[in-house]
Image (spheres, grey):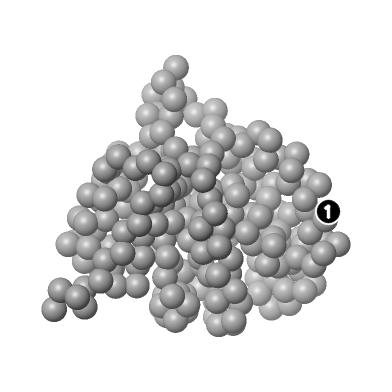
C-alpha cells in the first residue's frame, strides 16, 4: 500500500486555515478533512466563561480530534493525498493556554496515551499573522460565539503557536507570513502560495512576501 501524503494547515484562530485547506483540496485534488469544531457543545459557553468550561471544551476537542485522525489514518487505498485544517498536536497548544495546572495534569494523562497512536503529517503549513490582522479576520467572518474574543487571548495564542513551531522538527514545515497577502481573493497571491507549497521542502522553509517592498 502506498503511504498517503498528508498536508496539515495550521495557525492561530482567524488566520485562514480552513480557507487554504479548501483551496488546496480543490487545486491539488486532495481529500479534504476539516476539524469538527462546531460540534463541540461546550464551545459557546467557553467563550463566555472560559474558567468554568475550559476543561470540558478541551477534553471534547481532544477525543473528537483523536477519533477523526484515526479514521483518516485508515483511509482507503485509492486516496493518495489528504489535506486537513489542523494537526492533532494543536490540542496541546490550546490546552497549555486554557487549562490550569491541575486540569493540565489530568489532560496530559489522557493526551499522552492518545498521542502514541498518532502519525505526524508529511508536510505542515503554518500560517503566521499579527494579532491585529487575526482580530480583523475573526470580526469579518461574523461567527456569533467569536464576537466576544479578547485581543489579549488571541495574542497569547498567537505567541504560543509561534513558539511551538519555532521548535517543531517532526515533519517538513513551511511557514507562510500572511500579513501582506490574501490567497482567498487575490489570484496572484494564491499562485505564489501554491507554487511554494508544491516545491520540495526539507526541514523548515520560510515564505515571507512583502508587497510594500514591490511598490
Residue 15, can we see it? yes
Which one is in front, 65 or 175? Answer: 175
- Category of crowding for the residue at label 1, using alpha-carbon neighbours closer than 10 angstroms: few (below 14), some (14–19), many (at least 20): few
Quarter containing the N terminus: top left
Eyeballing the image, is 76 above or below 110? Answer: above
Which one is in front, 82 or 12? Answer: 12
Which one is in front, 181 or 171? Answer: 171
Quarter containing the C terminus: bottom left
Q: Quadrant of residue 188?
A: bottom left
Specify the farthest residue to the left: 215
Q: Quadrant of residue 145?
A: bottom right
**209 left or right of 70 in image:** left
Q: Residue 134 at x, y = what percent?
A: 45, 75
Eyeballing the image, is 160 above or below 21? Answer: below
Dot 1 corresponds to which residue?
A: 106
Q: Which residue does the image show at 54% across and 28% down from the upper left?
A: 74
Q: Which residue does the image show at 64% across and 62% down from the upper left?
A: 94
Amino acid at each position: 500500500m502506498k503511504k498517503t501524503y498528508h498536508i496539515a494547515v495550521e495557525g492561530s484562530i482567524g488566520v485562514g486555515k480552513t480557507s487554504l485547506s479548501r483551496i488546496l483540496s480543490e487545486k491539488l485534488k486532495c481529500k479534504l478533512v476539516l476539524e469538527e469544531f462546531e460540534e463541540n457543545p461546550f464551545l459557546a459557553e467557553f467563550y463566555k466563561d472560559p474558567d468554568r468550561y475550559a476543561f470540558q471544551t478541551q477534553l471534547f476537542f481532544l477525543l473528537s480530534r483523536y477519533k477523526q485522525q484515526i479514521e483518516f489514518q485508515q483511509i482507503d487505498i485509492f486516496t493518495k493525498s489528504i489535506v486537513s485544517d489542523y494537526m492533532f498536536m494543536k490540542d496541546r497548544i490550546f490546552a497549555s493556554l486554557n487549562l490550569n495546572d491541575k486540569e493540565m495534569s489530568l489532560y496530559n494523562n489522557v493526551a499522552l496515551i492518545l498521542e502514541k497512536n498518532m502519525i505526524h503529517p508529511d508536510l505542515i503549513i503554518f500560517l503566521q499573522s499579527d494579532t491585529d490582522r487575526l482580530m480583523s479576520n475573526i470580526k469579518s467572518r461574523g461567527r456569533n460565539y467569536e464576537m466576544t474574543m479578547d485581543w489579549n487571548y488571541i495574542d497569547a495564542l498567537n505567541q504560543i503557536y509561534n513558539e511551538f513551531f519555532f521548535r517543531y522538527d517532526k515533519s517538513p514545515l513551511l511557514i507562510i507570513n500572511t500579513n501582506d497577502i490574501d490567497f482567498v481573493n487575490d489570484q496572484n497571491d494564491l499562485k505564489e502560495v501554491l507554487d511554494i507549497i508544491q516545491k520540495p521542502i526539507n526541514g523548515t522553509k520560510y515564505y515571507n512576501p512583502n508587497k510594500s517592498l514591490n511598490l
